[in-house]
Amino acid sequence: MSEQPRRPRKPGKPYRRPQKDPVRILAFEALRAVDERDAYANLVLPPLLRKAREAGEFDARDAALATELVYGTLRRQGTYDAIIADCVDRPLREVDPPVLDVLSLGVHQLLGTRIPSHAAVSASVELARVVLGDGRAKFVNAVLRKVARDDLDGWLERVAPPYDEDPEDHLAVVHSHPRWVVSALWDSLGGGRTGIEELLAADNERPEVTLVARPGRATREELLGEEAAVPGRWSPYAVRLSEGGEPGAVEAVREGRAGVQDEGSQLVALALANAPLDGPDRRWLDGCAGPGGKAALLGALAAERGAFLLASEKQPHRAGLVARALDGNPGPYQVIAADGTRPAWRPGSFDRVLVDVPCTGLGALRRRPEARWRRRPEDLDGFAPLQRGLLRSALEAVRVGGVVAYATCSPHLAETRAVVADVLKQRPDTDLVDARPLLPDVPALGEGPDLQLWPHLHGTDAMYLALIRRTA
C-alpha cells in the first residue's frame, strides 16, 4: 500500500518517513481480507506467508509472529473491542474498520503477547503511519497508551460485568465469545458452571496440526519419523505435529497418502467403520463428502474390507477436492457431484452411510476464530431444513440392518440431538446405536447413545455423532 503524502513539517519536529514492517503489514492485510471479503484466515494467511517467504522478506520466526498476530487478534476480538471501547470517545461502530484492525493488533501485542509495551505501541503506530496516515496514527498512539496502563486481568476487571450479576455476559467478555454462543455451549454441556470456562478457554488456544495416515497408503510409524511428530491421543492413524511442524514438508502429505485431519473427524469415520452390521458389508456412502478428508479415510478403511465407497458432494468444485483426496485409494470408489437431499442412487443400496452435514461450525472455533463473530442465532434456522433433509435421505439410502452416521462439527443442540430426534420420530423402523463402545479408549463421551467430543476434554474439534440402524 502506498505511503500517505507528506504533511507540512512543524518547527523543531523534522519529518520522519514511516518505517515499513512487513510482518505487521501482512497481519493487517490478512485482517482486512477477513473483514472486507468474509475470508477465512486459514485460507488467506498461508498464501500471504508463502509469498513473503519466496520474496525473502520472512523467515520462520517472522511467519510465526504474523500467524500469532492474526489468529490471536481474531480469537480475542470481543475482549479487545470491549477494552478499546473504554478508551475511545465514540461508539466503536464509528471507528473506521481499518483503524480498528490496527488498534486490535496493537492491543493483542500489549495484552496477549510478551512483546514489551513500548515496542508494541511503537510498532503499531508505525504500522498506522504506513497504512492509515499520520493523523490516524496519532489516534492509534493515544488509544494504545491508555491500553498500556494496565494488564489483561486489570482490564477484564474493568470491562467485564461481574459474574454474579450476568454470568453469560461476563464469560462472553472474558473469553471473547458472543453471548449467544456462550449460552448455546453452556446448554450443550448440560448446564452448571462445570466445564464451560474450560471449553471457552480451549476455543482460544491454537490447535495442534494433526495428520492422518491413510490405511494401505501410509502408516503412523512412517509419519512419526518426521521431525516434531508425536502420536495422536485416540485415533490409531493420528499423528500430531508440535508447534512449528509444517504439513507441507511431510512427503506422505505431499503425495496424498496422508492428510491434515482433526482427530475428531478421524474418530467419526472410525466409529462408523466399526459399527456392527446385520448382513453384508460391501457398499459405503459418504453423502456430504466435501472437501474429502473423511471420504479419504473411509475409502481406505473400505478398501481393507474389499468394500466400495461412493463419495457424493453437491458443489462440483468441492467434488473435485474429494476426487483429489481419494486419488490413489487402493480400493474401488467413485466420486459424483450430486445433491444428497435428491439422491442419485437407489434406496436401500448401502450398508454404511455417513452424512457430515453443513452446520454453523461452532465446534471448530479454534481453527476458524472469525466464525464466532459471523454466525448469528438465525443461521440455525437456515441450516435446519438441510440437516433434516440429509438425514432423511441417508436413512432411505441405507439397507435394513445397515447403519447411518449423522455427524456435525457443532455441539449446538439445535444441530445435533434436536435434528436426530425430529427425524427419528417419523422413522419407527430405526434404532439409535450406542456409539461410545466403538471408541473404547476415548473417555467422557457423554450419556449416550450418541457422543460428543470437546476441545477441552479430548483436544479435538467439538464433533457430534449419532449412529442409527435401519431395522425394517
Image (tube, rainbow, N blue to C red):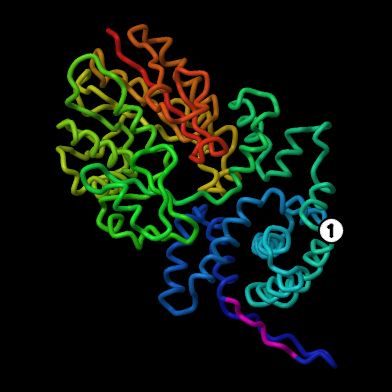
Q: Position of residue 302 (x, y in %)?
A: 21, 33
Disc 1 element: loop
Vertical side of 385 occupied by 312: above or below:
below
The quarter of the rendered structure image containing the C terminus is top left
Vertical side of 232 occupied by 338: above or below:
above
- Residue at 78% x, 69% y is 139
- Residue at 52% x, 18% y is 447
Part of the protein shown in magenta? 15-21
In the displayed structure image, the side of residue 450 where residue 173 appears, left or right? right
Camera-nearest residue between 246 and 97: 246
- Residue 72 sits in which quadrant? bottom right
- Residue at 49% x, 78% y is 57
The quarter of the rendered structure image containing the N terminus is bottom right
In the displayed structure image, the side of residue 127 where residue 27 appears, left or right? left
Q: Amino acid at mark 1?
A: Asp
- Residue 425 highlighted magenta (yes or no): no
- Residue at 48% x, 18% y is 448
Q: Position of residue 470 (x, y in %)?
A: 30, 13
Q: Position of residue 331 (x, y in %)?
A: 15, 39
- The residue that mark 1 highlights is 89
Vertical side of 381 occupied by 428: above or below:
above
Question: Callout 1: 10 Å neighbours few (<14), some, many (20+)?
Answer: few
Q: Position of residue 398 (x, y in %)?
A: 26, 20
Magenta: main secondary structure:
loop
- Residue 143 sits in which quadrant? bottom right
Q: How many marks?
A: 1
Camera-nearest residue between 248 and 11: 248
